[in-house]
Image (tube, rainbow, N blue to C red):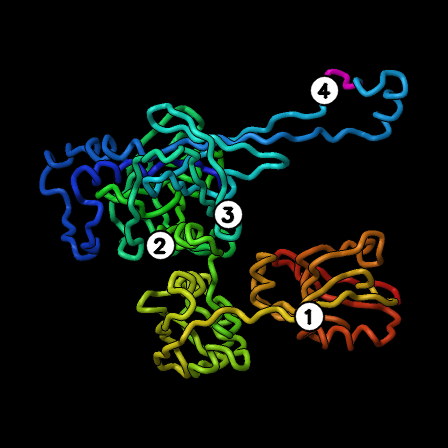
Amino acid sequence: MNFRAGIGTGVGVLGLVGLVVLGLWGGTQPVDAQQRVPPPSRESIQYSFAPIVRLAAPAVVNVYVSSRVRNRRSRLADDFFERFFGDDFDLGMPRERVQSSLGSGVIVSPDGVIVTNAHVIKGRGKTEIRVALADQQEFDAKVIAKDKKTDIAVLKIEGDGRRFPFMRFANSDTMQVGDLVLAIGNPFGVGQTVTSGIVSALARSKIASNAVFIQTDAAINPGNSGGALVDVKGRLVGINTAIFSRSGGSNGIGFAIPSNLVKLHVDSALDGRKVERPWLGARLQSMDRDLAEALGVSRISGAVVMRVYDGGPAERAGLETGDIVIKVDGFDVADARGVNYRLTTRGVGKRTRLKVVRDGRETEFRVLLAAAPKIKKSDVRDLAGKHPLDGARVANLLPPVAEQLELDLIEGVVVISVRRRSTASRLGFRKGDVITKLGNRPVRNLTDLVAKLRKRRRVWTMDVNRDGRILELRVPG
């Protein structure tokens, strides 16, 4: 089964416009406080979403991205033919071509701020972005923030002070499995399309790294990426991002980034700052069957505290190695990503409640979330010498380093660059490789690695974590 990102939906924006007219935009009644009942009769099934769609449609946009890409041709072929034909030689192939892509977006403020997926606006070289409104008017747009880790991008329409229809955010934490949702977008470029369904699952985190999703059975397809998932009040509950598919089309399993995380990125972008992810001060590992068996527990969910860092928020709160985090602020968490999502939406400087299982009993801790420690000069080093890492710049895998390189926070030392034609380059080391073992002994930090590299060896053996896979390296000394 394939995991496909890039469904470009223009989903949720539509309903908000109508709510503005009805004066419902500012409504604060939580969804879970509303009565949920099944259809009372066969006739009631004939109810229509048309009023919501009609009122919301003006806030859904198509996002067109074009980038100029130079063709890569053989330098030898160019040199040979250009001796005879000069710079005009191209064999009918232009040196530069335009690469285009299509996605969707949601206007979330009257001055034209748009949310879409980061992969929708991905391009090489000089990139131009155009957005088309539901009334076919087109505008240029610029990127004001982009986060590849969460696949969220924030754009701004260059509309000369014009006011645009927009959609308000819903509180995605109030959504429940079974709630009705709409998806509106431009699948396959056929034009604006509306589909309906329900929330199939919440907090799905085993779909992609560093993310949790709302799962829905509303049909979404390639071309829907960046669009909105909309509740029955026309509010934005998520940005449609990916599908599971064997064929490339919709199989009724789609995923959306929760609106609470999206709003956090929008607010940060408008304030001119990056999203600052809180640091727990502990290394977490998602619970699995092997870990549950080793710990002697029957529950295969939650996140196990594998290490508590000295002086961090977790240590100050009283967390210990072996604790199993099962809830954050009352919300169940299935794994480490679920914990990180809850902490991120809570924010730096806020207190959060962690419910953990310790020695078979549940207990609760209050943690004051802090910013990650800053990187010091001593945390980075250029390596040189008669060893496999000659020419590599490495760093302690601290939280800000892990975030910048989009890596899980594991124990080891990370390669952040490799000098060309160096030993490390010839051996294939690359940015993001994490050295976890040297000589069959764990590498805990930069000081530990440097000390181990000073010892001459007949054969260098090394474990390297690359994209979650462990590579074993053996090099003669």
Q: Secondary structure at mark 1?
A: helix
Question: What's the residue at 38%, 32% (across, down)?
Answer: 61
What number is the disc on residue 146?
A: 3
- The answer for how far apart the CA atoms under marks 3 and 4 are is 33 Å
Residue 468, by quadrant, is bottom right
Q: Nearer the viewer, residue 414 or 419?
A: 419
- Label 3 element class: strand
Q: Element under label 2?
A: helix
Left/right placement of residue 150 relative to residue 432 reads: left
Task: First in sequence, mark 1 or 2: give its number.
Answer: 2
**Residue wearing tag 2:** 260
State the CA–CA distance, disc 1 to disc 2: 36 Å
Gap in angstroms between the C-alphas marked 1 and 4 = 49 Å
Amino acid on which the number 4 mark rests in the picture: Met
Q: In front here: 291 or 88?
A: 88
Q: Which residues fall within the magenta stretch? A: 89-93
Q: Which residue is mark 4?
A: 93
Q: Which mark is residue 377?
A: 1
Residue 456 rendering spot, x and y as whole percentages: 87, 74
230 to the left or right of 407: left
Circle 3 Cα neighbour tier, 10 Å, few/some/many (<14 / 14–19 / ≥20): many
